Image (cartoon, rainbow, N blue to C red):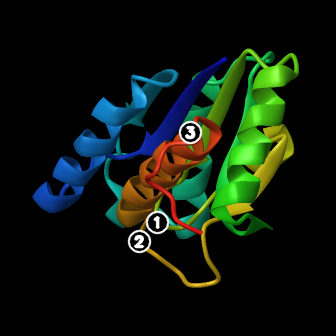
Amino acid sequence: MKITLLVVGKTEDKYLIEGIDKYLKRLKHYIGFNLLVIPDVKNTKNLTEAQQKTKEAELILKQVSNLDTVILMDEKGKKYTSILFSNYLNKQMIGSVQHLVFIIGGPYGFDETVYQRANGSMSLSDMTFSHQMVRLFFVEQLYRAFSILKGEPYHHE
């Protein structure tokens, strides 16, 4: 199985970039992982929130194949503990999933067309985080999940 994290817009803050890079290096020991950045939509000052989400949706959907299993990172999505998330990933690996794509949208979330394409959604918390911070939290949780599956001492419970 291969995992892709698809995000809208580049990560801007240096501390987030460094944190993400730290976990990307660790993840490559476990699984084929790709961080794919879709450029920000241009001239958003002239667009409504709905128009911006529509333009982002067009860019997102171009990057997803019909064979991909797509999970949206969404505040209303399913919540997992770290252990349950590792179990979810294990089931995907054991099953026939070839490519698991997690998507973090822009600041306004997703257009309805992206929700329609998705196979599911998950939330990292009941709290709201910036779409930039969620990237770091997600790659850390992905690393944690694989360390749990391998029985390594990173996760304590």
Q: CA distance from mark 3 to mark 2?
A: 25 Å
Q: Which three-letter amino acid code belongs to the residue tagged 2?
A: Ser
User: For the residues carrying marks 3 and 2, which lies nearer the camera in this image?
Assistant: 3
Where residue 4 appears, x then y in whole percent?
A: 54, 29
Where residue 121 appears, x then y in whole percent?
A: 76, 54
**Res 46 visible:** no
User: In this rendering, is residue 24 above or below 68?
Assistant: below
Q: Which residue is mark 3?
A: 146
Secondary structure of residue under mark 1 = loop
User: Closer to the camera, 114 or 23?
Assistant: 23
Q: Counting other residues with Cα less than 10 Å from the Cα at mark 1, is it few (<14), some (14-19), or many (20 or more)?
A: some
Q: Which three-letter amino acid code belongs to the residue tagged 3?
A: Phe
Q: CA distance from mark 1 to mark 2?
A: 7 Å
Residue under the image location 52 percent in, 22 percent down: 31
User: In this rendering, is residue 59 above or below 122?
Assistant: above
Where residue 117 appears, x then y in whole percent?
A: 81, 38
User: Closer to the camera, 3 or 106?
Assistant: 3
Q: Which residue is mark 2?
A: 130
Q: Which residue is mark 1?
A: 107
Q: Is residue 110 left or right of residue 23?
A: right
